[in-house]
Amino acid sequence: MTYNAHFRVWRGDASGGELGDYTVEVNEGEVVLDIIHRLQATQAGDLAVRWNCKAGKCGSCSAEINGRPRLMCMTRMSTFTEDEVVTVTPMRTFPVIKDLVTDVSYNYRKAEQIPAFAPPPGLAPGEYRMAQVDVQRSQEFRKCIECFLCQDVCHVIRDHEDNKQSYAGPRFFIRLAELDMHPLDALDRKQEAQDAHGLGMCNITKCCTEVCPEHIKITDNGIIPLKERVVDRRYDPLQVIARKVLRK
Ligand code: SF4
Ligand code: F3S
Ligand code: FES
């Protein structure tokens, strides 16, 4: 069944822009990215949009659809009624390059600041041994496709540009949690998360978890356990004594 949908798509660049109104054909089974591609092919040849896999796996086609951070390739047109206006805007937390394409390099800078997995000295690759339960714990976090929708929705940086310097955001809190839960990782990820990456600024609004297309329980399984371990480390009397003795 075919119908014409009313799309409003943000057009512009770093210097400013506005929503453009378009009427675009929709066919049964299509997703928002199909409509954006049809719009590009028929009416707006210079419309900038980033995409790659069209299967919810590359994390490229992130945008805001009717104000909600979503993957365009995983948002079915059947989500909306035929007479509903569908508004597509770029992710608000990152600077616009052109139209729906944003500069997400903030995330790459944060990724660079987190040291890689660090096994204990003397243990070579091939000698790593760990229990299956530990493997499974971090498996959930490794499903991340780096779409950065969680980063886009987190109010700590969405509403406060100046926090970007000191705040890594939910995607990188789960990276730190994954490393912290790894029984062979020898670095102190708890202190790093708190001091260098602003873990304390997250006030557990859980919006990140709500928008994650991989359904990773970012807050409950990553951020909250990491926060709890930071607190344990600081206030657990045995840990305090041990740190004093070991001067750590
Ligand atoms: Fe995207 Fe989820 Fe990864 Fe965040 S944690 S970047 S929302 S896949
Ligand atoms: Fe932000 Fe998620 Fe915390 S949205 S405030 S990182 S729970
Ligand atoms: Fe790859 Fe949408 S195009 S996730």
Image (cartoon, grey):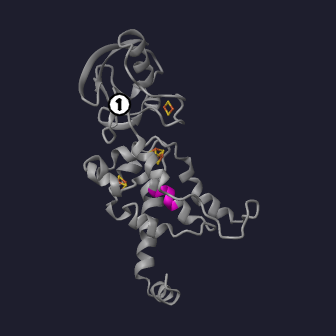
What residue span does the magenta drawing correspond to?
Answer: 173-177
Q: Dot 1 lies on which element?
A: strand
Instruction: Out of 150 and 25, give the one closest to the viewer.
Output: 150
Name the image quarter holding the N terminus. top left
Q: Nearer the viewer, residue 198 or 56?
A: 198
Q: Image check: 233 left or right of 202?
A: right
Residue at (40% x, 75% y) in the render: 231
Mark 1: few/some/many CA within 10 Å (<14, 14-19, 20+): some
Q: Indicate the position of residue 57 as horizontal and vertical percent values.
A: 54, 36
In which image quadrant can residue 87 be found? top left
**Mark 1 lies within 8 Å of ligand 3 (Cβ measured):** no
Q: Which residue is rendered at x = 46% and y = 46% of the image?
A: 108
Q: In the rendered view, would you say 71 is above or below 136? A: above
* 80, above or below 186, in the image: above
The answer to which of 117 and 218 lies nearer the viewer is 117
Residue 61 vertical position relative to residue 243 in the rendered view, above or below:
above
Residue 240 can be seen, yes or no: yes
Name of the residue lying farthest toward the right: 126
**Pointer 1: what residue?**
97
Q: Is residue 42 above or below residue 202?
A: above
The x and y percentages for residue 111 are: 48, 51
Task: Judge from the rendering whether residue 247 lies leftward or rightward of residue 185; answer left or right.
Answer: left
Three-letter residue code for mark 1: Ile
The residue shown at (46%, 17%) is 28
Q: In the current view of this chain or complex, which residue is farthest to the top?
A: 42
Q: Position of residue 222 (x, y in %)?
A: 47, 59
Q: Is residue 26 visible?
A: no
Name the magenta segment's main secondary structure.
helix
Give yes or no for residue 15 being in the magenta stretch: no
